[in-house]
Image (cartoon, rainbow, N blue to C red):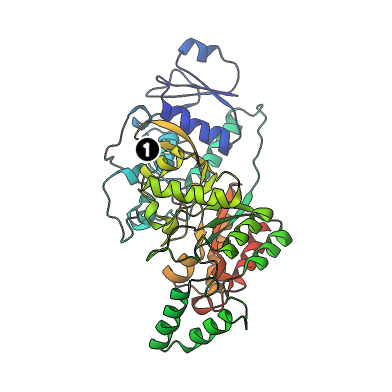
Amino acid sequence: MILIYTHKITPRVRYIFKHIFTRVLLISVDFTSKIEEFVAHNGPKLSYTKASLGNEFFIKSNDLLFEQGVSDLDINIQKWEDVPCFFANNLKEVIPFDIFAASFYLISRYEEYLPHVKDIHGRFTAEESMAFKNNFLEKPVVDIWAYKFLRILKEKFPDYSYKTREYNYISTIDIDNAFAYKHKSLVRTIGGFFNDLLKFKLLETWNRFAVVWKLKSDPFDTFDKILRLKKEYNVKTVFFFLIGDYSTFDTNVSASKTKYKLLIKEMVDYARVGLHPSYFTMKNVALLKKEKERLENITNMPVTSSRQHYLRFSLPETYQHLIDLEVEEDYSMGYASNVGFRASTCTPFYFYDLDFEIQTPLKIFPFALMDTTLNDYMKLTPKQSLGRIRDLKNEVKAVNGTFITLFHNESLSNYLRWKGWKRLYESMLKIATS
């Protein structure tokens, strides 16, 4: 156990110290604001305050962890050896910045509460983020800082026994369209036929006809393959099913279709299943509740995991709604347009609500990359994508973090815009599990 002295023990102090020490470094931590208690402690200890008490291990604190609410902060990026950092303490110390305030700023997504320009879907964009502007979006700097900090701890307190966490990989699959042509309503099928014909999409017209008349299998029905690869590579896999009502942005098979319900029930037998709340649930708690109950009625079990469709979430409202509905895990923390680490960490963390200044029970699982980001936004080839996947995995592996990827069942189809991408998922699994 490491004892932390600070002049004021705030919810922010408790939250970020416990995250860095307990979740990242596997070190238990305790706090005191009594100088005599700190001085009397014989084990490892450090002070986190404005000025050192003596010659103890000391980190000069920024004001951020002792404030409430959100204000526009003046941030200057500097370097700690070769890693970007900020909230410099201007001391010739081994740690030249407030590692805890900087980590809190990034993990709490402080900047997303500040005024910013949203994209056409109402999302906070990668381009607005400090990580993107300062070229560290593809580095989990919070974890990198923590491991550099651990190296210093080991020098300061060599007799303390340190444990090391293990690298972990989670494959997540979003089901936006379970089937390309099967099990759609008669109106959608006929409308699709005429739409394809009018646009001279002859290949799609033929494929739709062949699938509907059972002459060939549906191209998006890749579930058996995903389950086979899950078993072959022993991969923890989570499926997120979109079961919202049909809209411009939600075009999945209707959740009232028996075949779709059977598919969801089958996936429950082999993997974890979560909710993929539809496009308009971002600020609509009633709609979110309706979809959660709909999925629970299909699976006959509580829904505890969720990922927003289009990654549309607004802080803190969307997360507050998930907490109210007793969802325990969210997997939306990432960007549609760029790969990398939106919260600058590859460690699952509890959402800290800056509105109420509390750590909430909602655990956030940040993902590092998405298939549509690589293909649609970054316009990479499958081979180039594999290189980026390898780089991101290596960043996570270097700090024994949790590498989370987001793919869709349709990207394994080798169909339309996914032509040539069929084998990327398996190649990624080989890299991620090696």
Q: Quadrant of the N terminus?
A: top right
Which is more toward the observer, 335 or 271?
271
Above/below status of 301 relative to 2 = below
Question: Quick one: SS at disc 1?
Answer: loop
Q: Residue at x 60, y 74 (%)?
A: 422
Locate residue 394, reporting x and y percent.
Answer: 59, 56
Could you tell me if residue 366 is visible in this image? no
User: What residue is pinned by disc 1?
Assistant: 88
Residue 96, image x, y percentages: 42, 37
Q: Percent x, y for residue 338?
A: 43, 61
Establish if 243 lies above or below 421: above
* Left or right: residue 126 compared with residue 252: left
Amino acid residing under circle 1: Ala
Image mark count: 1
Give the vertical position of 171 relative to 166 (above or below). Answer: below
Q: Residues within 10 Å of mark 1 (few under 14, many from 20)?
A: many
Q: Residue at point 67% right, 57% down?
A: 433
Q: Is residue 229 left or right of residue 408?
A: right
Q: Is residue 190 above or below residue 256?
A: below
